[in-house]
Image (cartoon, grey):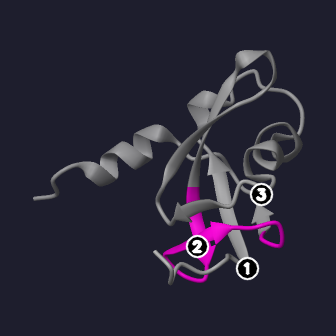
Amino acid sequence: CPDVKYGKRIHVLPMDDTIEGVTGNLFDVYLKPYFLEAYRPVRKGDLFKVSGNMGRSVEFKVVETDPVEFCIVAPDTVIHCEGEPIKREDEERLDDVGY
């Protein structure tokens, strides 16, 4: 897709059930190595898993992108990861049929 733009910034949050017992800075241990020089495409709502030290994986969700909807994470993209972890039960409830 040649029209996918480099992101100015993205906001990702971890899934709460994948960070239990995880210590250290999530950005430095997981996100920075995952995105560094990789030019990864992301879309708002995406879930992605990152393996860190000791073979431990953390799952993250893309909650916001600028430009909107999707972009490529380039070296100049600012990656925000502040905020409360996302509860998986809340996410799964969004998938339920609501009648």
Check disc 2 and report the residue beneath it.
71
Check disc 1 and report the residue beneath it.
8
Q: Is residue 64 left or right of residue 43?
A: right
Percent position (x, y) of residue 28? Answer: 88, 43
Give the extent of the magenta segment. 62-77
Foreground disc of the pair 1, 3: 1
**Mark 3: few, some, or many residues within 10 Å (few <14, many ≥20)?**
few
| Residue at x 68% of width, y 30% of height | 19
| Mark 2 element type | strand
Q: Are marks 2 and 1 in contact (CB under 8 Å)?
A: yes
Question: What is the distance, in whole Å, between disc 2 and disc 1 at their CAs?
Answer: 9 Å
Foreground disc of the pair 2, 3: 2
Image vertical order of residue 57 relative to residue 15, above or below: above
Among the 4 quarters of the image, the one containing residue 72: bottom right
Query: Residue most toward the top?
Result: 54
Task: Name which of mark 2 and mark 3 comes first in the sequence.
Answer: 2
| Mark 1 element type | loop
Question: What is the distance, in whole Å, between disc 1 and disc 3 at their CAs?
Answer: 17 Å
Which of the two residues, 47 or 20, is positioned nearer the viewer here?
Answer: 47
